[in-house]
Image: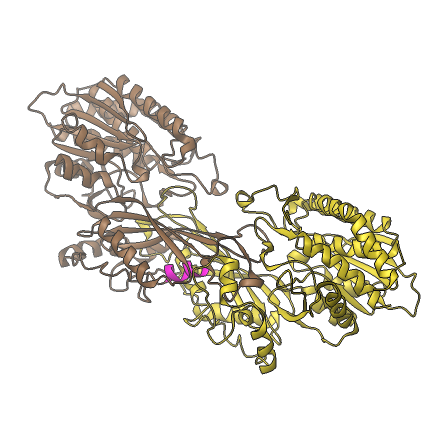
Chain colours: A yellow, B brown
Amino acid sequence: MSDSRESAIEYVRENYDRFLEDLRELVAIPSVSMQADHNSDMGRAAEWLAARLTALGMEAVQVLPTTRHPVVYGEWLGAGGKAPTILVYGHYDVQPVDPLDLWKSDPYEAAQQGDYLFGRGTSDMKGQVIASIAAIESLAKTSGLPVNVKWLLEGEEEMGSPSMAAFLPEHKDLLGADFCLNPDAGMIAPDQPTITYGLRGLAYFELHVWGPDHDLHSGLYGGTVHNPAQALAELVAGMHDAQGRITLPGFYDPVRPLDPEEHADMAKLPMDEAFYISQTGVPALWGEADYLPIERVGVRPTLEVNGLLSGYTEAGSKTVLPAKAMAKLSCRLVPDQQPEQVHEQMLRYLEEHAPKSVHWELKLLNVGSTAITDRNLPGIKSMETAMETVWGARPLYKREGGSIPVVAMLQEVLGLESVLCGFSLPEDNVHAPNERLHLPTWSKGIDALVHFFANLA
Amino acid sequence: MSDSRESAIEYVRENYDRFLEDLRELVAIPSVSMQADHNSDMGRAAEWLAARLTALGMEAVQVLPTTRHPVVYGEWLGAGGKAPTILVYGHYDVQPVDPLDLWKSDPYEAAQQGDYLFGRGTSDMKGQVIASIAAIESLAKTSGLPVNVKWLLEGEEEMGSPSMAAFLPEHKDLLGADFCLNPDAGMIAPDQPTITYGLRGLAYFELHVWGPDHDLHSGLYGGTVHNPAQALAELVAGMHDAQGRITLPGFYDPVRPLDPEEHADMAKLPMDEAFYISQTGVPALWGEADYLPIERVGVRPTLEVNGLLSGYTEAGSKTVLPAKAMAKLSCRLVPDQQPEQVHEQMLRYLEEHAPKSVHWELKLLNVGSTAITDRNLPGIKSMETAMETVWGARPLYKREGGSIPVVAMLQEVLGLESVLCGFSLPEDNVHAPNERLHLPTWSKGIDALVHFFANLA
């Protein structure tokens, strides 16, 4: 290990408690992007980050408006024109915290218990943003930062990054870089560093079904009126066949067959049936029998019910025939599926299957494209070496079940490939109650980022 | 018309505004039996009725406790042992008012608009209780009441009358009568008086389905975990076949075939397809094609979804794979189906169809037996004549889609048949927002009750 790295890693150790305190402060701001009553919190989180970037020595720090939530930008170009420029991506928004009663501690008061820090955003991804800040500060304040950096910290990732489609082309020059570092993907286990080279896309829908123009007495109309909740259940149930395959017309046509080599790689990952059962607590797994569990979540497309609502849902037995019913549905997409195509397929499915006895409306709430990154990118090689240095194990390459729409947009609009990594773990309860961050892994992650930037020099 | 009736009907006219004010006062008490935060309102409503019966000259007025909500009793036995004794039934509880935002006026501030009084319980059945009080007062304060009366006013009808099973046998002697007057059934149109001689039974369930022990990120687990909302939709969808028939094993076995004569009667009712479409606003009717719409709601059993809840249901696109999902389901039953049998059938259906990839639990929330009343009962003949006097049209005989569990219990426990009538209309929005009472029909209903009691002399 060269002296310059040693001094930076030492700085990380000395300032660890302060970095953790930074994370607590950021978690304390309830920046839930999709709930309008948190709009002022979104602004506060952006300002907090802008101040933190300024303190870090970044220049041209700006809170740039979008039609919804602002983007925080900052840069340090002092490494000169010959050094590479890295665009560091992050998002400061978080998912809603409901159901709140299942949290064991306040989601906005980061609480440490043993090796874990509990709180909304600790893992996804305020913790990862602070790790990037910590690594860059540790280099900048010791041996000096060997690369140029730009920051792109958005506030709409949990909504599907709707403003990025306009923001990226508008700020094309400002954001120009050699590649992007995106620590919004995770590791598969604390001792197994992971680099993600593929992401699924997303098409998120809200399906409304209604029949009568008002709620009816189930005893006076049941049997002659198609119950909208039943009609919705029938439509939703029909979206999968008995083998767990999705029945939207043409859904699988653009899906690339799985490469046998990729399948062999996947089979090596320590994520078998027992792993998924222990992670989730389900009585048995489910899904396409021809594919490994890890393939079903990574390389196969899915259709999930994210929410259902109809009629009377409180205590007791109201005998209502509800006027309407709603489902939130989302598809995770894989190359070469296009969200707009899937929207068309969903419309076609509903046109073919919705009975004449009800009305329906499909709303497309958000979309994200699939992305595959070249594994031979220099940035990826730097990350591979950095992870091996810190963990003593070569990183596994993985395609991720989640969707990060900005990755595809950066490819398409700015021509930037992303180095997708991150120091979250599968058991972190992201998007769920009791989200948590494994602090030993986070601490190693900061070290890995130090090495990553140093490797690029 | 005899003089005694004339003076009583005149009294109804003179005191109509006061009777309407009584109804407004009773509607103003939010006596929602199934919501615990209204428990004190239930007590207030019972006390209000006890005071009103006392003012009416009733004796032995009591508010009798049950394990949930009290029963109001009162009697007047001054007509002597040779005159018949009529048990007047009513319920003072109402359905919940949600969704509140669809009400055009405060549900608890009865608001008159044209011929209608809007408010929760105006039609079902505070309006009917006040009509009974008004008719008895009008006779008592003029020519004198020609029959003995007892009152049974309960507070749990909208919960399925759970306390009646214990209350009726405990108070068998107190409640002894020749028959019961139950004005909790309605008329099919303002110019068509109606007597109901059959009621459907009820079995109300809550079905819980869960898989993972916590909410999951849909992108990280979707495809390997059976989404509980999807599993619930599959189970609910499978409860009907493509012909709208219910698939619970053995469900139709005890159902009596429809009598051809009864079918001919049903075909005469002015409740055709156009009627049901205009009442509900649905684009097309639905249900068993072999039966008339009125038969589907009256003589055939049904299975309705009363509520659905799972996952994220607020604005936006949370990509959660929900841990659990819930459906409220209820079956309307016809002779000779038994609620307990249907509970067994539902359990059997779930055992046969629920996949091993989820857990489930079925809760039986409440039950009610079916009932058929002899059309030749003297009380029914008295009501037939009374309605003909007031409307100039013979009442139609009808089997009702709704369930009034107390009717079967009175038959079984006390041997009492019920005269089922009432002055609500199909378009009254009972159990729904903007419940209303058609005041001209209500006023005629008070007159009809005056004639009914006079006919029994």
Question: Is-magenta flag for residue B233?
Answer: yes
Asked if residue A457 lies left or right of residue A308, the reply is right
Across and down, in percent, residue B7 comes to 21, 22
Q: Which of the pair B56/A446 is nearer the observer? A: A446
In terms of image quadrants, where is residue B16? top left
Taking B105 as reference, is A438 left or right? right
| Residue B385 in view | no
Quarter of the image where one finds residue A161: bottom right
Q: Residue at x 87, y 56 (%)?
A: A140
Quadrant (top left/top right/bottom left/bottom right) for the C terminus of chain B: top left
* Residue bounds of the magenta highlight: B230-237
Question: Number of numbered discs present?
Answer: 0
From the image, give the main secondary structure of the stretch colored magenta.
helix
Query: Is B145 positioned to the left or the right of A286 in the image?
Result: left
Q: Whole-percent x and y of residue A403?
A: 63, 64
Q: Is residue B260 magenta?
A: no
Q: Residue at x 92, y 61 (%)?
A: A78
Q: Residue furthest bottom?
A: A260
* Residue A81 placement: quadrant: bottom right
Residue B371: horizontal and vertical position, in percent?
18, 45
Query: In the image shown, does B86 or B192 lie closer to the viewer?
Result: B86
